[in-house]
Amino acid sequence: MKKKGLVGAVVSALCILLYYGAALVLFALIPDFPWWGKVLLSLIPLGVCAVVVLVLVQRIRELKSGETDDLDKY
């Protein structure tokens, strides 16, 4: 397993998760906004965070199997 690829994947995912996590908190803290609007606005960052975690898990599995570059599939 390549450590460089793993570190890059984790750092990238962490940056995206922090960005959308901050957006989620900001959406939740909007004053004088209806609760249902806050819920709807929060669904987008939650969805992005879930997808990022799933892609990170998939990439870690690829790296553990020895596949360092997925461009050879195409």
Image (spheres, rainbow, N blue to C red):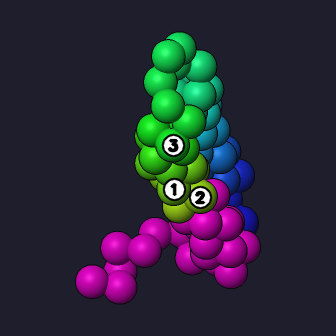
17 with respect to 71 (left or right): right
Bounds of the magenta span?
53-74
Identify the disc placed on residue 50.
2
Residue 74: quarter of image = bottom left
What residue lies at 68% left-to-right and 74% top-to-bottom? 61
Q: Nearer the viewer, residue 3 or 12?
A: 12
Residue kind at label 2, given as amino acid type: Ala
Is 44 within the magenta?
A: no
The percent position of residue 49, horizontal first and vertical second, equals: 57, 50
Q: Which residue is mark 3?
A: 36
Tell me the kind of residue under disc 3: Trp
- The residue drawn where x is 35% and y is 80% is 72
Q: Mark number for residue 13? A: none
Query: The N terminus lies in which quarter of the figure?
Result: bottom right
Image marks 1 and 2: residues in contact by CB distance under 8 Å: yes
Q: Residue at x 45, y 38 (%)?
A: 37
In the displayed orientation, state which residue is furthest to the bottom. Answer: 73
Badge 3 density bin: few <14, some 14–19, many ≥20, Cα 10 Å:
few
